[in-house]
Structures are given as structure tokens and as C-alpha cells.
Image (cartoon, grey):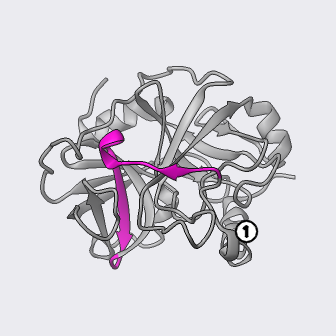
Amino acid sequence: MKQSLVNLVFFLVVAHAAVQANARIIGGSAIKIRSIPYQVAVLEYGVQMCGGALIASQWVLTANHCFEERSVFRYTVYSGSSDSTVGGVRSYLKEIYPHPSFDYKEARYDFALLELKKPLKFGPSTQPAVLPKTGESVEVGTTLLATGWGLTKNDEEPRNLLRSVELEVVDRNECARLLESELHDEVFCGYKAGGRDTCQADSGGPISANGKVIGIVSWGLGCGAENKPGVYGNVAEVRGWIAEISGVNE
């Protein structure tokens, strides 16, 4: 049976309460922002609720489902620090651009671009991501690096410190069978064995491989459950739209 994104998001909200005691990026470890200087946090009224990838001095790629409201005054982007509470730069938004084919019910094209009011200054902790070319394939078995400030494994792992976890691309057809959901070319899946995953508040954050941001965190059924791979937006499938809106060409 196909699951709608509405039901999936509801599932995640319910799951949040269930996993508070041992919530996670499962199997992850702390990472310094200089290792992934394109990583940003998206804050709503000052509270971190999603991640994103800096792709140019005034542009961030993230997940569209993060924005129930389109008011730019609700959101800010935080960059340049491993700690989501101190040491970074907070930027205000000029505009939010949802992907025109985004379908909440069908869980398709879960991408958004954020235009910042002012350009960020680049330095060791703030750099744009390298993106794949249009149509660049994501091979089964590719090692992925997922990063973010989402829910952590236990209370001793503070959420304000950036964390990372290695995952592995799963065959899309197998992933669709496991999740009982139809999946299309604009997504790929990562890791089915359990014990490693992204979780709440990691949505929109970068999925990196071979020096490029090839995906963004979109959705999943719970966090780190066996045979429940995470689903990630495939950046190579939306490069034309990214270039059209932001001017970030291949």
C-alpha cells in the first residue's frame, strides 16, 4: 500500500515521542563544520528544525516539507559553526522557492531553495557545496555521509553539536518494497540494516558522496529501524531547476 507524505510525517511526529529516550542519528559521531562547510541549520523562530546545504553565497538547498508556512519572517539560516547555538552566522531569508512539482501527498520533489537577504562571506567554515551534474547516477552500494543536528542516540549526545553517520545506497526497487511506497527517480534510499540513520530535524540536510552533495534528507519510517531505509531527494534530478532559480549552473 502506498503511504502518503502526510501519513509519513504524522508517523515521524508520533515516533518522536516514542524515541525520545534513545532518539538518534544512530551510529553517528561528532564532526567539525570545517569538514562539511556547506552544512547549515534552518531555524524557525530561532529553534533548529531542519538542515540544508549552502550552494552559493545567497542560496541554500533544503527540503520543501520543512516549510508549512511560507512567511520568510519565521525562518533563519545558521551557518559557519559546529554548534547550532553559538559561534555561527544567522541569516534572514529574502524568499522561499518550492519545487514546482512538489507533491506533499505523493512524497515527490521534496526540494526548496532559500534565498538569503545578504550574501555570506566564505571562509574555512563556510563554503558552497559541489553538486552533481544533471542525470548523474547514484549507484547502489555508494557510501554516503549524512550530517545534521537532528535527534541523537541518547541524552549524553547533545543535539547542538553537529553529527555525522555513514550510510549505503540501497536499490530503489527493494527500498520501495520495504517501505510499501512507490518511489521515483527524484529519490534514492540509504541503509536498510538498521542501527544507522537520520532522524527528526535532519530533514533538508545534505547527503554527501565523493565530495559532492548528491542528496537531501526527505523522509523515513521512524529512525534507524531494520529494513526501513531513509529516503533522500536526488539532487542530480533537479539541477535544471536549481540553475533556473538560483543561477548555480553545472
Identify the image quadrant of residue 89. bottom left
Of residues 102 and 119, which is closer to you in this image? 119
Q: Residue at x 16, y 60 (%)?
A: 117
Q: Residue at x 73, y 32 (%)?
A: 172
Where disc 1 sits, the SS reads: helix
Disc 1 residue type (three-letter): Phe
Q: Residue at x 65, y 66 (%)?
A: 9
Image x and y of residue 48, in percent: 41, 70
Does 184 sit above or below residue 229?
above
Of residues 196 and 50, which is closer to you in this image? 196
In this view, which residue lies farthest toward the front? 156
Of residues 156 and 229, which is closer to you in this image? 156
Instruction: Please say whether residue 215 is one of the residues in the magenta stretch.
Output: no
Q: Is residue 110 visible?
A: no
Q: Residue at x 68, y 54 (%)?
A: 220
Quadrant location, the C terminus:
top left
Does 72 sit above or below residue 129?
below
Total labels drawn: 1
Image x and y of residue 241, in percent: 38, 37
Apparent side of residue 56 relative to residue 118 in the rendered image (left or right) = right
Q: Is residue 144 visible?
A: yes
Image x and y of residue 88, in percent: 23, 61
Which portion, as a residue range, is magenta? 27-46
Instruction: Please say whether residue 37 is one of the residues in the magenta stretch.
Output: yes
Apparent side of residue 200 relative to residue 173 in the rendered image (left or right) = left
Does 244 sit above or below residue 89?
above
Would you call the spot at circle 1 few (<14 residues within 10 Å), some (14-19), or many (20 or more)? some
Image x and y of residue 179, in percent: 80, 48
Tell me the residue that label 1 is attached to.
11
Apparent side of residue 165 relative to residue 7 in the rendered image (left or right) = left
